Amino acid sequence: MFKVPSFELPAPLDMSNFKSLPEWAFEAIKEEIEQFQAGLGADHDIGIIVSGAQSAIHASRVRLADQMIVFEGVDEENRIARVIAHYTQVNFRLVAVPKIEANARRIGF
């Protein structure tokens, strides 16, 4: 009769602390935005110009939606604006733009 050797399986890894690639990308974008807006004066909003766009979005929110990075705010005519880009294709420029309301816009995370 053949005897099967005994062995123990390793304990499963705790995956709750692991981040996905989109989450890592979002964290890097978040850090860049926080550093940029820390240097803005009280009379400037943080503006985001997405590749190919002609004008800036006065950004008030950036979020991760599955694999998409979503920028939300208003355009220069105070219209609600939203830009959605896949995390592997997001390409934007941060700019200081004159504020359009009494208080300068900041992105809160």
Image (cartoon, rainbow, N blue to C red):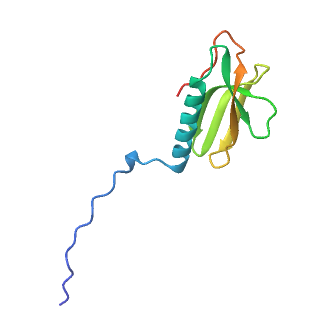
Q: Position of residue 109 (x, y in %)?
A: 52, 28
- Left or right of 74 in this view: 107: left
Q: Position of residue 101 (x, y in %)?
A: 69, 12
Seen from the viewer's position, the closer of residues 24 and 10 is 24
Which residue corresponds to the image point at 59% horizontal and 31% vertical from the top-left?
33
Which residue corresponds to the image point at 52% horizontal and 45% vertical from the top-left?
24
Seen from the viewer's position, the closer of residues 95 and 61 is 95
Identify the residue at the far front of this view: 39
Q: Position of residue 78 (x, y in %)?
A: 76, 19
Which residue corresponds to the image point at 59% horizontal and 23% vertical from the top-left?
39
Which residue corresponds to the image point at 34% horizontal and 51% vertical from the top-left?
14
Quarter of the figure that contains the N terminus: bottom left
Identify the residue at the far top of this view: 102
Q: Is residue 42 above or below residue 66?
A: above
- Left or right of 8 in this view: 34: right
Identify the residue at the far right of this view: 54
Q: Is residue 13 above or below residue 46?
A: below
Q: Position of residue 28 (x, y in %)?
A: 54, 40
Q: Let me know if residue 107 appears in the view.
A: no
- Left or right of 89 in this view: 12: left
